[in-house]
Image (spheres, helix red, strand yellow):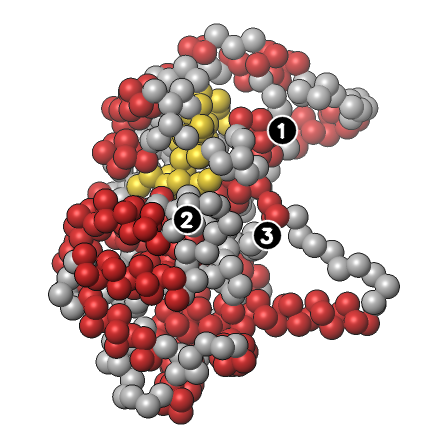
Amino acid sequence: MKLSIDNLKLGIKWWQEREWPKDLLNHEYYSIYEDRAGGLTEQWLKLTIERLVRWKALRSSRPGNTKGKFYGLIKNQLSNIRTEYQRIIDISKDEPSIGSVGWQDISNLYEMMAEMKDGSTVFASKLGHFIFPKIFIVMDNVGTQVITYDYYWLGMMREWSLFADKDAALDLLKFEIEKHSGEVIHPLYPFETKTIELCHIGDKWKRKRQLASAGNEHSSLKEFQTPAFLRGIEKSMIRKMSDRAKPGSISLGLGEPDLPTPEVISREAIRVIQEEQNGYTLQAGLAALRERIAADYPHLNLAADQVVITAGSQEALYLILRTLVEEGDEVLIPNPGFIAYPMITQMVGGKAVTYRLPANDDFSFDVDDFKRQLTPKTKVIICISPSNPTGRALSKRDLSAMADAVITSGSNAFIISDEIYRELYYDSERPASISEFYPRTIVVSGL
């Protein structure tokens, strides 16, 4: 886990050894809250642009990335930002914090901000922090940038809930601020988000020092550099929790049945081994198996050469996205959704964009939000029904609405229909497939 007292101490030390304010920005939060007191006005925007420069959120090698450009971009969205700001205030009933909102409450605001600077998590997290310091965790290229902000934020919220030493961590942070600040700690100082940020910085600094130490011991060996497309990818929170589970724990994390293998499967596997049918197959898989799968989707009129057998659905997802997605293409994924989607998207050079399945509406399909996320850059849409992790199956009406929205958008996008759980249903009718409504569909399924 990144959240630990040791990582917090390292993060504070790293901070204090740089030319950053040793009061951990206590004085800055007086200004942030004072600037925001009159609402998100144009005067607030002018002060915020200057703060974004000081916090190094507007650095870019791209020509034309000036203060004036971003002032105009934010001003054009200021009315929408105010609307989201007020909505989040109304949800929280008080100063919003990580304990009073969920990602579904802040995702629209985040996506709006990220879009202003080509999906930059650094820019969006810092701008969000100036609006709601107690919600948005600051990210930086130097210290805390990871793959996608939504999965990072959700992961940190889960980790924060499990952090047994949070009271000691908050006390340590207060002590450091009081030691270096000439002012009383601001009553709305964002202790939780700052602790998470510093722990992440400390963890990254620790790893760099460990690599440097190992390099000194083996100076003749060149340090391995992680390829850019893999940087920031780490174990999912499900894997981390599974690793920490005590022996004998009942796992509700991984979708792995504990039922005995059906006898018919065991017998058939034994027969194939005994008959020595265990050599290489065609690259696309056994012809008879592909024909059987094609017959399962009569409405698609598939030939056997339009079916490929892979070693699991994740390999299939990777191969599809590697084939379809080019650098900068957008892949629209459900939120909540399968944790591998954004990671695979990053690995192939795409940008993950989420569409909402809101918890307050039983994780149903929000067609209006879906339409807002569709852009000319949308190359692939992932639809999973029944859903992982919610179990919700989209209705024929939902699937038809999704197909109509994609057609109307003119994006010509492909839809990947993840149907790995399609055989798990509890009424008389098998769940519908988006392939019944949209012709440019690629179905992923398995046993």
Whether residue 83 sits left or right of residue 270 in the image: it is left
| Kind of residue at disc 3 | Arg
Tag 1 residue: 310
Task: Tell me the quarter of the picture where residue 388 sits.
Answer: top left
Measured as percent of width and height from the top left, residue 5 is found at: 50, 80
Of the two numbered discs 3 and 2 in the rendering, the one whose residue sits closer to the viewer: 2
Q: Residue furthest right?
A: 220
Measured as percent of width and height from the top left, residue 143 is found at: 52, 65
State the residue at coordinates (35%, 54%): 67
Q: Is residue 7 above or below residue 245?
A: below
State the residue at coordinates (36%, 77%): 25
Badge 1: residue crowd in 10 Å (few <14, some 14–19, many ≥20): some
State the CA–CA distance, disc 3 to disc 2: 25 Å
Question: Quick one: 295 or 35, which is closer to the camera?
Answer: 35
Q: Earlier in the sequence, mark 3 or mark 1?
A: 3
Helix, strand or loop at disc 3? loop
Whether residue 211 sits left or right of residue 125 in the image: it is right
| Kind of residue at disc 2 | Asn
Q: Is residue 142 above or below residue 124?
A: below
State the residue at coordinates (79%, 71%): 216
**In this orientation, does residue 422 appear?**
no
Tag 3 residue: 231
Helix, strand or loop at disc 2? loop
Does the CB distance between marks 3 and 2 fall below 8 Å? Answer: no
Question: Quick one: 370 or 190, which is closer to the camera?
Answer: 190
Q: Earlier in the sequence, mark 1 or mark 2?
A: 2
Tag 2 residue: 65
Measured as percent of width and height from the top left, residue 285 is found at: 67, 21
Measured as percent of width and height from the top left, residue 247 is found at: 57, 65
Question: Quick one: 197 or 422, which is closer to the camera?
Answer: 197
Helix, strand or loop at disc 1? loop
